[in-house]
Amino acid sequence: MTAAPTPSTPNNAPSAQPVATLLAEMVLQYAQRDASQALNDWLADALVQRTGTSPEAARSTADSITSYLQQSHHLRADLRAHVEQGKSRSSWVASQIERIASDHQASPADVAALSALLSGQTSAEGTPASPRDWNDISRIAFAKDLEQQQLLHTAGSVLEDGARQWASSAVDVWLQEQPHSAALAQKLLRGELDVNSATGLQATLAIATDIATRQGLLGGDLRQAQERGELIPEWFAQNTFIGTENARTLYAVGTGQLDASEAIDRMAETATASLVSTTRVVCRKIGGEMGHKLGMALGAKIPFLAPFAAPLGRKVGEFLGDTVGRIAGSAAGKVIHKGVELAKSGARAVVSAAKSVAQGAVNFAKSLVPSWF
């Protein structure tokens, strides 16, 4: 894909309003849908009706998105339980890498390399930063580096905050007469939805973003990337999961339930669980005897790996999170904005402490997917 000549800005990017309005319309339809219809059937029908996608392809997309979200929620709960037992997050990451390797007949070092590639963590030469050998020492050292990378991504997104500022009040007026969708978004932000209900709302937002891409509302570059198979359904699910869960965390900061350091830690926890989920998905998609095929994939940097590591995805996630706040009402949006400002102190502390780590991190995919922003 040809890179954009200059970084996109609110002046040269597609308008936020059509995208945000589509998201809001989909949330409203989800809130009013016939509960007797299975979620994935409803999501597939929406994709068919709005884009003309074949029923089979639409159902496959819906299944992939909901499966990813369910898996990510499960992994994050497992990670929290692990840490609550007094164990480190890095030991959890290492054990998950080993589990994925076992499930797909791959070496842990290869799976670690894939995780590094997906997170944007590479060596100075641009190759995946992973251990040559997988042993008791290297596994934890690698997992700690990967954890630091997630902290840096999280801190950077809070400090940049560009997507939230761009979204502004694009849908405020439209939403004033939509109490059903507002109530649903408010419950998500307050943590009042169970996992199944939260997954349903997040899947709706992911499908809506997929639709926006197919309709060209996010620009021609993303639409072409999707047509080439570089934007697989899980890309939309990943960014929706991170964006909306981070919005919920920032809402908690804005209401005084979390302090800045707790917020950054929780957001990094979400990013870590999502990275493990993505690694598992990619291993499954490569398929077959992973020991051979994974090595080939890493060497060739197959197309659908790049969007997962690119900064663009985090920007899309931020926009989705902000839109949920707008759907919940102007008061909720202001609480999230307050949470962002309060969380910045924790983000600055992370960046300062991890500065030496950041110097060695290079995002290989930045030039492969033009930024929407």
Image (cartoon, rainbow, N blue to C red):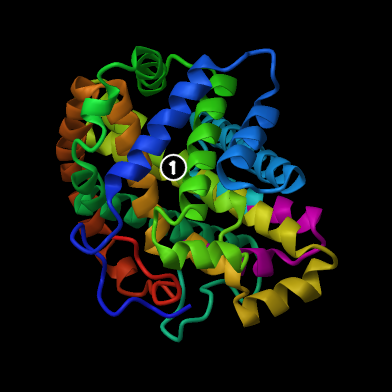
Magenta residues, start to end: 97-120
Residue 176 visible here: yes
Q: Residue 118, image x and y in percent?
A: 53, 63
Compared with 34, 159 (above or below) is below
The residue at 66%/39% (across/down) is 62
Q: Residue 367, image x and y in percent?
A: 40, 77
Magenta region includes residue 98? yes
Compared with 200, 363 (above or below) is below
Residue 11 or residue 254, whichever sits in front: 11
Of the 4 image quadrants, the one containing the C terminus is bottom left
Compared with 64, 226 (above or below) is below
Q: Residue 286, image x and y in percent?
A: 74, 65
The residue at 52%/23% (across/down) is 30
The residue at 60%/38% (across/down) is 49
Residue highlighted by disc 1:
242
Q: Quadrant of residue 42?
A: top right
